[in-house]
Image (tube, rainbow, N blue to C red):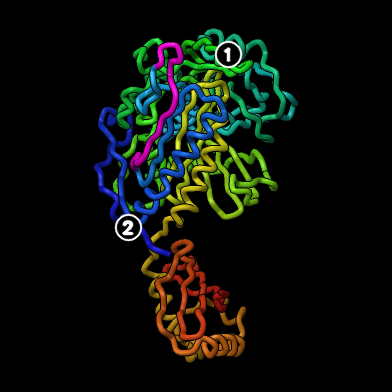
Amino acid sequence: MKKLPFLYFLLISYCFGRQAAAQSYKPPVFTDPDRMKKIEAVLPTIDKIYKEYAEKNHFPGFTYGVVVDGKLIHTGTAGYTDIGKKIPATTQSLFRIASMSKSFTTMAILQLRDAGKLNLDDRADKYIPEMRNTKLLTADAPAITIRHLLTHAAGFPEDNPWGDRQLADTNEELLKLIQSPIAFSNTPGVAYEYSNLGITLLGYIIQKISGKTYQQFINESIFKPLGMTHTKWEYAEVPADKLAHGYRWRDGQWTEEALLHDGAWGAMGGLITSIEDFSKYMALHLAAWPPKNDADAGPLKRSSIREMHQPWNISGFSPQFKYATGRPCATVSAYCYGLNWMRDCEGREYVGHSGGLPGFGSNWRILPQYGIGVVAFANVTYAPTVPINLQILDTLIVGAQLKPRQLPASDILKQRQQQLTQLLPNWQNAESSGLFAENFFADYSLEALKKEATGLFDKAGKIISVKEIVPENQLRGRYLIEGERATLWVSFTLTPESSPLIQEYHIGEVKK
């Protein structure tokens, strides 16, 4: 497996915090020419798949982008943002991205958390007193917390498409709804149920804590440092030649959907942005991986971005899932902080979010392990952009033969690999070598270890080379020993001691 040059990330001065929000952020970019060449070879296939899908699903206008290693490397467009005026869709066209807005709101909450302004396990009614008399579903229900709101675990009912129509409501109308009282479908903290209301309440909390509207806070603390200068909340502020109008496909023709003004519910789905602007946000998320020692330059700490990506609330399991090629591959999904997470049977982990409103459908997904992501916007009601983005990412990985980005091995892993290899296959003086943890020879028979290794080395014949260790993490790895007649694999795990020792070991033959 080829190791990519992670140490080439650019070092940028630290600018996190509200005081530094006006400073610009540039994502770290690294390139591997061979990898990029393989990716570029697949791009014509990707264009063909996207455009055929847009035509099949009656997208009036369609834009998409591919982000690799912190850079928007490829874009495509089709159709019109305004059918009547025949205005072509471009990568600068501004589409309403609906629920893709949610992670900006949750990112703002984490900025406030990191600044010491709130705790995620604070009761929501600490900041929204109107919730103090909320009657929960059961007498033993816990109070709703900010973390519940972040992860769709507050007990509110799924509120699509009702929530879509609340976009322009005022704060006063929101508070009146909360006091009405609210009906619950679950007790807080026991189940996942998608709730636009929950994210909307986070927007109100941002206002209560910061003293600014959530729109102003996000504009200053996220959009400005990222250079997302064309992203808007209110469609009336968008230049007419850039605004994507929304349509519904009905009875063989498109009918225009009315655009809703911005309001209290925009925190869950009101953003209007372009492929070029949104790709900067994707680059920020990709730059959080892998963990590293470089200066932390973003509007949110890398560790907090990675926290956003964690699967906090299981939302589904699809044992019959198949990729577009027909390849079966079960998946499990979860909700993070304003983001969706999915892992497939091959170990790929996807992070992103879809969006749907009357007139619009969108989706973005990144694979942090691979350093790649895609985003697509369409201006037809609830455009099905999730399946196509999964297909595109799979096509990119398979077509370009991409491998997960590999962490560099720690010095201790490389040292223990060298020392262990010198003991193989006869394990001479192993017990007195000082390489093994106190459990090792209680768990492994030395005679059995010798017999196993000697047999495998005899089968391998003359040793040609010992490959670099491939780390699973900084204290566990696997490497290959190449012989004339066979190749062997060796894996080991180290202890958490200050001078880590080998606590577990395995060896075997690579099957052809």
Q: Nearer the viewer, residue 429 or 452?
A: 452
Q: Nearer the viewer, residue 132 or 5?
A: 5
Element carrying mark 2: loop
Distance Cα–Cα, label 1 vs label 2: 48 Å
Whole-percent x and y of residue 90?
37, 26
Which of the 4 image quarters holds residue 138?
top right
Q: Is residue 434 left or right of residue 354?
A: left
Residue that extends furthest to the right in the rendered view of this protein: 138
Q: Do tag 1 and tag 2 residues touch (Cβ < 8 Å)?
A: no
Above or below: residue 420 compared with residue 384: below
Task: Kindly tell me whether residue 183 is visible in this rendering.
Answer: yes
Above or below: residue 359 compared with residue 479: above
Q: What residue is rendered at 49% in x and 66% in y? A: 476
Q: What quarter of the picture does the N terminus occupy?
A: bottom left
Label 1 Cα crowd, 10 Å radius (few <14 / some 14-19 / many 20+): few
Element carrying mark 1: helix
Q: Nearer the viewer, residue 297 or 433?
A: 297
Please provide the residue range marked out in magenta: 71-86
Q: Is residue 371 magenta?
A: no
Q: Earlier in the sequence, mark 1 or mark 2?
A: 2
Amino acid on which disc 1 is placed: Arg
**Disc number placed over residue 165 in the picture, else none:** 1
Q: Which residue is mark 2?
A: 5
Task: Kindly tell me whether residue 108 is visible in this rendering.
Answer: no
Q: What residue is rendered at 29% in x and 50% in y? A: 9
Which of the 4 image quarters holds residue 86?
top left
Whole-percent x and y of residue 283?
37, 40
Above or below: residue 151 compared with residue 89: below
